Amino acid sequence: RWECSSFVKTIDLIPGPKRKPIVGNAMDLPKESHQIMQTIQGKWVKQFGRVYRSWLGFRTFVHISTPMLMEKMLTSQTFIDKGKSYSILRPWLGEGLLLASGNKWRRSRRLLTPAFHFQILDNFFDVFNKNADILCEQLTIANTPVKSDSVEEVDVFPYLKKCTLDIICEAAMGIKINAQLEDSEYIRNVHKISEIVVERFFSFGHFLPDWMYHLTPKGREHMKLLKQIHGFTSKVIRERKEEIAREEIQKENDDGAPDEVKKRRRAFLDLMLLSVKDGVELSDLDIRNEVDTFMFEGHDTTASALVWFLYCMATNSEQQALVQEELNEVFGDSDRPCTMEDTTKLKYLECCIKESLRLYPAVPNITRYMSEDSELGGYKIPSGASVSLQIYALHRNEEYFPDPDVFNPERFQTNESIGRHAFAFVPFSAGPRNCIGQRFAMFEEKVLASSLLRRFKFSYDIAKHGPPRANAELVLRPRDGMPLKLVSCPRCLNFI
Ligand code: HEM
């Protein structure tokens, strides 16, 4: 009966790999995790076109990768709800901004948008710089030979992840975890739960309802970690609430807040707590969901973007030298921190970051749930389908990016980008449901990237390792880490 339903018949009018009974196209996917994305966003796009469908069991996906179709989906006010595949994040993130739908999402988005205003982001520059310094110190230590053994390479990825976790902890919750310097149970739990969620995503567990999954050994571990992570965030929220209440009393008694309170940088959590005091209705659970969402969205993404940026620099020495020349013009010999004003001058660095995000988008695809019938590329899309917006395939569309696999930052110089379709490059998505942390992320990337390139020259031994394998998990990550050679350069001009 299912085979003959109008839903299946309508979907099967769209080109795509031949569907097998029950499993759909699940068995057509390669076993090697890094080849799955190459199949879905490479081979099948070439074979079936830039609108095609696939089946994972009884679940269908319509994959799109042209700027026009992206624009239609991303600017829609109707199709703002996420696809069903996001539901495995729900036990962790609840109805936080990433997963919320309808009016709940609209309300949260309105409430949280002011937290990403330039003036507020400016306050986070010292967090970025302080952690960038620790990162450079840690890499220097890792790169220092013990006795006479020379250090050949350093896998930079774990260092970047810890650094971005420290930054987001301070920005989202206002607390210092020091993951770069010491072991932290909370950070271990966040890593572990991300791993378990990815494992579930690619396994049969994905199709089980939460209550059933939580009866399996992995599911029980998932529950245990959730309890600890939620317990930690709730405790931080409680403590910040008490602190804000204490500050208020101090303000009333002292007729004005003490200087250190006035100057205090406000974490995203504080801004939410202050709006509750001003009468906005937000329960403790709402606040916890938002904090957990920032923690989830705000670290793996930026670490992934940075690791691919470093890879692009390490394999393109000419462009690396140009970035270092620009850094030298802006900073000279000084080791002063990078300010918001500096970031506006680092135009070539920005082009390189964008070009690395084009080739290796940290979020390689997003999905939307079709709540009503629609049309895409001449095909009817029935309500109930999920549309997969293939950012990776879009960014390698040669119609918009000639020689798409070549790293060429000049594409993002103003004169080169004039006339290019606005939806041909969307690493942060676009439209009403775009990444709320986009500016925060770009500032963070620029501070970390500039600090690293002011101190080191990077290279990658392609003959030894071959091109890195990119796994599309929650983010696009290098499957086997990122072993880079680092040469300290107190004055980067030495290398030009
Ligand atoms: C290079 C870094 C980043 C990239 C590439 C990135 C990319 C994205 C993308 C593509 C989406 C849309 C997801 C979807 O529609 O399914 C998104 C949403 C989101 N991002 Fe980011 N992101 C980055 C960093 C950050 C940071 C640092 C934060 C927080 C401080 C953040 C917070 C969020 C949130 C809360 C959403 C959900 C927005 C909504 O649905 O209204 N992101 N991000």
Image (spheres, rainbow, N blue to C red):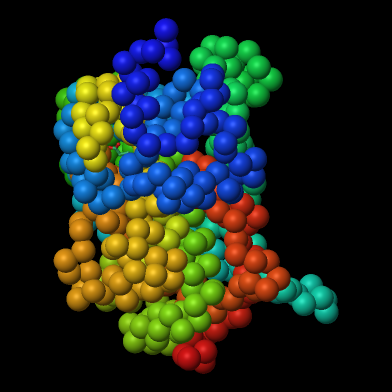
Residue at point 59%, 80% (across, down): 488
Q: Quadrant of residue 409?
A: bottom left
Percent position of residue 470, x then y: 55, 53
Q: Nearer the viewer, residue 112 or 57?
A: 57
Q: Is residue 358 left or right of residue 434?
A: right
Q: Is residue 183 left or right of residue 26?
A: right
Q: Where is the N terminus found, in terms of image quarters?
A: top left
**Ligand 1 occupies quarter:** top left
Q: Nearer the viewer, residue 469 or 397?
A: 397
Percent position of residue 443, x then y: 33, 61
Residue extending farthest right: 148
Percent position of residue 28, x then y: 57, 36
Q: Nearer the viewer, residue 80 or 300?
A: 80
Q: Quadrant of residue 297?
A: top left
Q: Nearer the viewer, residue 451 or 31?
A: 31
Residue at point 59%, 48% (across, down): 34
Q: Where 191 sits versus 205, above or below?
A: below
Percent position of residue 136, x then y: 55, 69
Residue at point 44%, 23% (across, down): 59
Q: Where 376 sits versus 344, above or below?
A: above
Q: Is residue 251 left or right of residue 236?
A: left
Residue at point 34%, 63% (across, down): 398
Can residue 259 be seen here? The reply is no
Can residue 97 be seen here? The reply is yes
